[in-house]
Image (cartoon, rainbow, N blue to C red):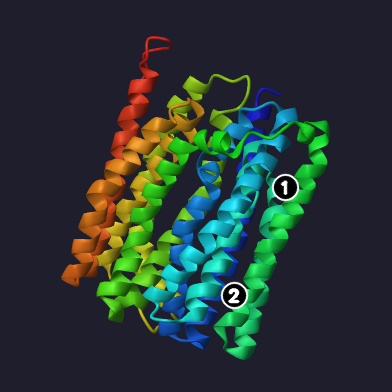
């Protein structure tokens, strides 16, 4: 009986891992099919729309994607649906505002490619309305799988089949968009059904709702900037290498997805109601350092052969690019757990904002200069520097928080 909590935690991680394994496998198959059927150039244009949407979706999520899971985990069960429905109202308005702006930006970067610009941007902004962070905060991976992940995976799978048959990128994106939209609708219905009388409470004024997310949105917006900037800068300044760096960027994204079950578990575990949050944050912070080293070394070693396989032998990322991206991923792992699980649960979201602003202020100019130099190695190194700055600041911030006189003098 004493091991029940441990086994429960392992079951939750296993449940979240199902989502990761399935999405990674489907995404890998889809990318391989796209690269072969539509060609590297059109795939690279689609990736531009995806990257722009990845940056723009931050303003749709408005911080709920970063701190929402910890907020839900730390809230009474009866209040959770109302918190989600409030966020959905706000995010729906933001979606309508952000989408046309992002589509224009992507179309300009792709030099008028409407598929890679407008359609790709719309498709990858829809998940900003989804409920994945809510289900993570609940600690219920089964609901995450059934109501959020599965519709999106089916849409991606259908899109891969469609492009395999038609060799047309737009068929892939339309199927994906339909899957993502279905996930939003299904999740909303399920959560609304859970709400009961709580949903009848007057919603917060939109200004109050947005104000409560100001630190979280600043954090995610600035971090999203220097995460999206490398590929966009390569597309602008070193366009002949856009497909190669796109493969590196895609592999880094897969690594982030692979790490997400660990982050999702820690977000719910550290902030769980009735537990010693400070002690759990200390443990999670220490484990984050170990996991970062393991993840960074693994990515650096596996990226070249993986990208060669992903492209069907048409392109590959060299170790000169893979190694600094491995360093970047190690820092991402550390800052994800320390920032989004530990500092967020302890109520120090301001530290997240400061760290990411600092990282972006130093990293963004470095990334642009690196792309202007024409060397992919410098681009990858600039990203690694940005992520290392963020991770270092957050680790030091967590040490300071945990040494506060109100709690035990502990270190990470």
Categorize mark 2 by other alpha carbons within 10 Å: few (<14), some (14-19), many (20+).
Answer: many
Screen quadrant of the N terminus: top right
- List the single residue furthest toward the bottom: 166
Label 1: which residue?
142
| Residue in the foreground of this view, choosing between 63 and 339 | 63
How far separated are the C-alphas under marks 2 and 1? 26 Å
In the image: residue 230, left or right of residue 338: left
Say if 305 sits above or below 69 in the image: below
Say if 349 sits above or below 259 in the image: above
Mark 1 residue element: helix
Residue 11: tell me if it is visible.
Answer: no
Q: Position of residue 391 (x, y in %)?
A: 33, 40
Q: Nearer the viewer, mark 2 or mark 1?
A: 2
Q: Position of residue 133 (x, y in %)?
A: 60, 44
Identify which residue is drawn at 41% across, 45% down: 333
Q: Earlier in the sequence, mark 2 or mark 1?
A: 1
Label 2: which residue?
173
Residue 72: tell me if it is visible.
Answer: yes
């Amino acid at each position: 009986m004493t091991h029940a909590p441990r086994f429960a935690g392992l079951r939750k991680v296993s449940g979240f891992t199902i989502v990761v394994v399935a999405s990674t496998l489907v995404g890998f198959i889809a990318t391989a099919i796209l690269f072969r059927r539509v060609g590297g150039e059109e795939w690279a244009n689609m990736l531009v729309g995806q990257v722009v949407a990845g940056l723009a979706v931050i303003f749709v999520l408005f911080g709920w994607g970063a701190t929402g899971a910890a907020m839900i985990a730390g809230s009474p069960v009866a209040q959770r649906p109302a918190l989600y429905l409030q966020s959905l109202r706000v995010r729906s308005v933001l979606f309508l505002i952000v989408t046309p702006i992002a589509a224009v930006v992507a179309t300009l970067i792709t030099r008028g490619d409407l598929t890679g610009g407008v359609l790709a941007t719309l498709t990858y902004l829809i998940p900003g309305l989804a409920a994945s962070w809510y289900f993570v905060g609940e600690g219920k991976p089964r609901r995450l799988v059934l109501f959020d992940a599965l519709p999106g995976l089916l849409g991606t799978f259908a899109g891969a089949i469609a492009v395999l048959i038609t060799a047309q990128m737009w068929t892939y994106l339309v199927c994906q968009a339909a899957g993502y939209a279905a996930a939003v609708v299904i999740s909303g219905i399920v959560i609304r059904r859970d709400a009961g009388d709580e949903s009848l409470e007057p919603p917060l004024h939109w200004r109050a709702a947005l104000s409560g997310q100001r630190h979280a949105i600043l954090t995610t917006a600035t971090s999203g900037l220097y995460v999206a900037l490398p590929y966009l800068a390569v597309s602008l300044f070193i366009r002949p290498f856009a497909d190669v760096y796109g493969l590196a960027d895609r592999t880094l994204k897969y690594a982030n997805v692979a790490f997400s079950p660990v982050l999702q578990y820690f977000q719910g575990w550290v902030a769980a109601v009735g537990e010693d949050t400070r002690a759990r944050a200390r443990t999670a912070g220490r484990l984050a350092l170990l996991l970062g080293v393991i993840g960074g070394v693994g990515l650096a070693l596996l990226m070249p052969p993986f990208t060669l396989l992903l492209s069907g032998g048409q392109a590959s990322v060299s170790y000169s690019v893979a190694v600094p991206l491995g360093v970047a991923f190690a820092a991402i792992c550390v800052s994800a757990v320390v920032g989004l699980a530990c500092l967020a649960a302890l109520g120090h979201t301001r530290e997240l904002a400061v760290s990411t602003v600092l990282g972006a202020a130093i990293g963004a100019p470095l990334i642009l200069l690196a792309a202007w130099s024409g060397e992919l190695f410098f681009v990858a190194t600039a990203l690694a520097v940005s992520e290392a700055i963020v991770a270092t600041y957050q680790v030091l911030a967590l040490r300071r928080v945990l040494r506060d006189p109100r709690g035990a003098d502990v270190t990470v």
